[in-house]
Image: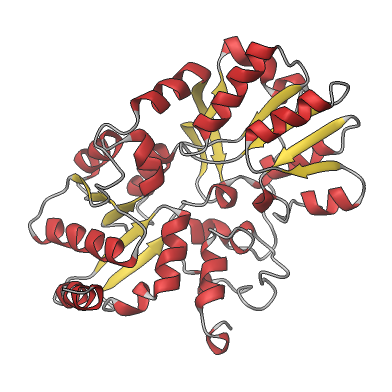
Amino acid sequence: MNDKTYMKELLQEIQSYKQEVSLMEVCGTHTMAIARSGIREMVPANIKLLSGPGCPVCVTSQGDIDAVIKLCQEPGIILCTFGDMMRVPGSDSSLQEERSRGADIRVVYSPLDALEIARKNPEREVVFLGIGFETTAPTIAVSLEQAERERIKNFSLLSYHKLVPPALEVIFSDPDIRVDGLICPGHVSAVIGLKPYELLAAQYHKPCVVTGFETVDILEGIIMLLHQMSQGEARADIQYRRVVRKEGNPIAVELLERIFQPEEARWRGLGSIPGSGLKLRLDYESLDAAKKFQLPQIEDLPIKGCSCGEVLTGKISPRECLLFGRGCTPLKPVGPCMVSHEGACAAYYRYTPAKERN
């Protein structure tokens, strides 16, 4: 059986399901894959596919973005970041604008690149901006251990890392958000395994399926969710078995627990969630940039007209935002969901015909 025939059979099975359900993906790669493949248009209208808080750049709070911009304005600072943070709008500026005004902001591909910059610039303070979920945090933990071993004193981390399961619990417990099942992230789950979803499925009686990123993977994941719903079941399962194991990656988890500890963190659209952020443990406190530079917590100020918070929680689709395709485009983004390549608004804009954008 070829892929096209198999996909046709999967779609026929999905189309045979008649109940109204809302399924949420919580991974930026899934967001882009669903938009690129046209899956949202392939499934029947009674099956609603929502985009959730799966883009780490997008869920970073406005106050935290403003704090990063404030830090890079300090003399003697070299701020290292992944490229997708450069154009994220703060309340009054962005990292890209600050670099054009003279701030030393460098795009890197790994925290180890930032560590090398610290070695070569011992007279400067080098700060790595940590934005991401459980997938990227282990690599950053490795760089911190290396900095400790080499006693590199001019390197530090500004950690705005987030943990996915606490955010999913908020989604499930919010009466204003209807989610009947979760298409769970493949990359994050390769680290944390199935247990967090098992707890969520048992507590909220909602099925969770860890799914891969190919079109066939996503269609299979949707069918696995629909099968559970039709049978009145709610458990955690893995479609993406070629990569994800039930136990996850115990070595990576142990590394995270050795370097970091959970703390309350602010999420765009979800507010402050206890135990959903990662801060450095006491043994690594000297590498904590927020403490090293006494960075204040800046109030979250909403961006006028921006509905990223509602998009990230599945309350509206990107096209329901009044700015989508009008005042907010990838060339002139107003909110982070249009900036990041994993953002729902960017995905919708890129794969929506021009005549349907506004």
Farthest residue, direction front: 2
Q: Is residue 100 above or below residue 202?
A: below
Q: Is residue 336 above or below residue 67?
A: below
Please give the name of the residue rendered at 76% of the width and 52% of the height, measured from the top-left corner. Answer: 91
Q: From the viewer's perspective, is 217 left or right of 112?
A: left
Taking the image as shown, residue 317 lies to the left or right of residue 172, namely right
Question: Observer-nearest residue: 168 or 85?
Answer: 85
Coloring applied to the structure: secondary structure
Where on the picture, by quarter, is residue 321?
bottom right
Classify residue 4 by image quadrant. Answer: bottom left
Above or below 218: residue 19: below
Question: Which residue is found at the position 58% from the left and 86% from the top?
Answer: 354
The front one of 21 and 186 is 186
In the image, 51: left or right of 136? left
At 64% from the left and 73% from the top, the residue drawn is: 323
Is residue 209 visible in the rendered image? The answer is yes
Location of the N terminus by quadrant is bottom left
